[in-house]
Amino acid sequence: MLLTLSHSPFHTDVPALLRLAGEGDDLLLMQDGVLAGLTGSAALDLLLAAPISLFALKEDVEARGLTGQISDKIALVDYTIFVTLTVKHVQQIAG
């Protein structure tokens, strides 16, 4: 399953979103959701504890001036990879 997080982790129930995730699922951080990938954040700790692969849209990270603050455990991807992830996963959940 592909999970997408487009809202700030301060305005989203990240634990509830992660309860829907299973081993082998992917999570894409986009728009204000990239804030969940900030090094040292509580949201990042939750994401890293989940059995999922983590991605963030590079354009959204750069637009917020966060390139140097995003965890290196999160793969920065472009829209081509975003499309690849949506094709890979029939089921998708947005948060």
Image (cartoon, rainbow, N blue to C red):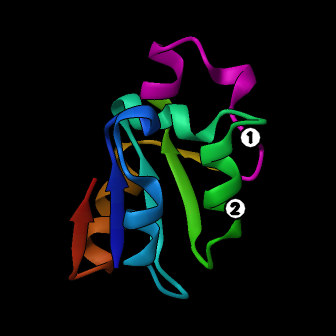
The residue under the point 62% across, 79% down is 51
Marks 1 and 2 sit apart, C-alpha to C-alpha, by 10 Å
Q: What's under tag 1, amino acid-wise?
A: Ser
Residue 45 is tagged as none
The image position of residue 71, as x and y in percent, is 74, 40
In the image, residue 68 above or below residue 31: above
Residue range in magenta is: 60-73
Q: Is residue 79 left or right of residue 70?
A: left
Dot 1 falls on a residue whose secondary structure is loop
The image position of residue 62, as x and y in percent, is 53, 19
Q: Residues within 10 Å of mark 1 (few under 14, many from 20)?
A: some
In the image, residue 94 above or below residue 71: below
Label 1 or label 2, whichever comes before in sequence order:
2
Mark 1 in CB contact with mark 2 (< 8 angstroms): yes
Q: What's under tag 2, amino acid-wise?
A: Leu
In this view, the residue in front, 19 or 80, is: 19
- Label 1: which residue? 71
Residue 48 is tagged as 2
Q: Is residue 95 left or right of residue 70?
A: left
